[in-house]
Image (tube, grey):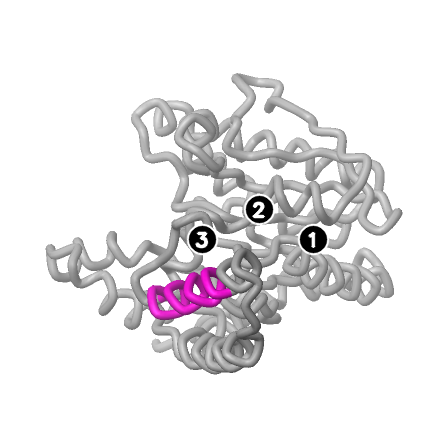
Amino acid sequence: MNGQFLDFERPVIELERKIKDMKDFAKDKNVEISREIEALEETLKKLQKDVYSNLSPWQRVQLARHPQRPHSLDYINLMTTDFVELHGDRAFADDKAVVGGFAKLDGEPVVIIGQEKGKDTKQKLFRNFGMMHPEGYRKALRLMLLSAKFDKAIIILIDTPGAYPGIGAEERGQAEAIAKNLKEMSRIPVPIIINIVGEGASGGALGIGVGDKIFMLENSWYSVISPEGCASILWRDVSKSPQAAEALKLTAPHLLEIGVIDKIIPEPLGGAHRDYLKQAQILKEEILFALKELKGLSKEQLLEKRIEKFRKMGQFIEEI
């Protein structure tokens, strides 16, 4: 665990450390305590199930932000081969908060695009914490239009605390760039599979979030605003973020229930950061299954179903 854990994980981490210490002691001193270790390991399994099967929305938000959680580049490296990154929006700059290009998914050529936060402080600053500028949305759209030109499916990995809210971004048309992506993604005639792998905040996520299938990892979140932002507006008190997370219905089970997403992708016990390879394999299998289903549709059917999918979101009452 590298010393990084969340408060509610403390009992699990402490027991894991105790087991590790006992194993090291048994090895160094050549002492037979295997039965005691096995008993503790059984206790650990029960504790893990108790802790991670009863997470609150706020705890899931914390897991989505875990400092060791895999990011888009991790999934790209683990799920695909022959990745060729493409850069720039051909108008202003190359936004490092989003990476994308051509790759092979189980041998099949696709275009894969992901928001990248970075791991350490240097990388996070370089990637702008995964917050895209207008040129990032235009870069993503350029890649998507390329995929349409060559008739390749699009895989999107969403993980952002929101679009960058700086003055420069607004001057260069942040809202217009996001709005144009929404419009164009609704009519790109190739399969688009959206995967929320961490945070999915506001228009920052939705700007690359229109697709035929929308999947969410078990401990990710997706909402019009962050819990902190909601708490600041409603109660003028950021300490009420846990209550805001509950009210926003931002977890995968809530969003599946109301039809915003299509499927919840399970995570290894304890979260995606516990086993990068296993998580990437689970996600890859779900994407491949969805691609097989979508390939059976004609382009007209694909677009019709995509538009109908988003039209069904929300309830409307018309009165004269």
Q: Measured along the vertical axis of the image, is residue 298 above or below residue 38? A: above
Q: Quick one: SS at disc 1?
A: strand
Q: Quick one: SS at disc 3?
A: strand
The quarter holding residue 254 reads: bottom left
Q: Is residue 312 visible?
A: yes
Which mark is in front, 3 or 1? 3
Q: Is residue 272 magenta?
A: no
x and y percentages locating residue 233 in the rendered image: 17, 55
Name the residue that disc number 2 marks: 183
Q: Are marks 3 and 2 in contact (CB under 8 Å)?
A: no
Residue 193 shown left or right of residue 295 in the figure:
left
The residues colored magenta run 9-22
Residue 110 shown left or right of residue 158 in the figure:
right
Instruction: Work out which quarter of the rendered image holds the C terminus and state it.
Output: bottom left
Amino acid type for the residue under numbered disc 3 = Glu
Name the residue that disc number 3 marks: 199
Q: Are marks 3 and 1 in contact (CB under 8 Å)?
A: no
The quarter holding residue 28 reads: bottom right
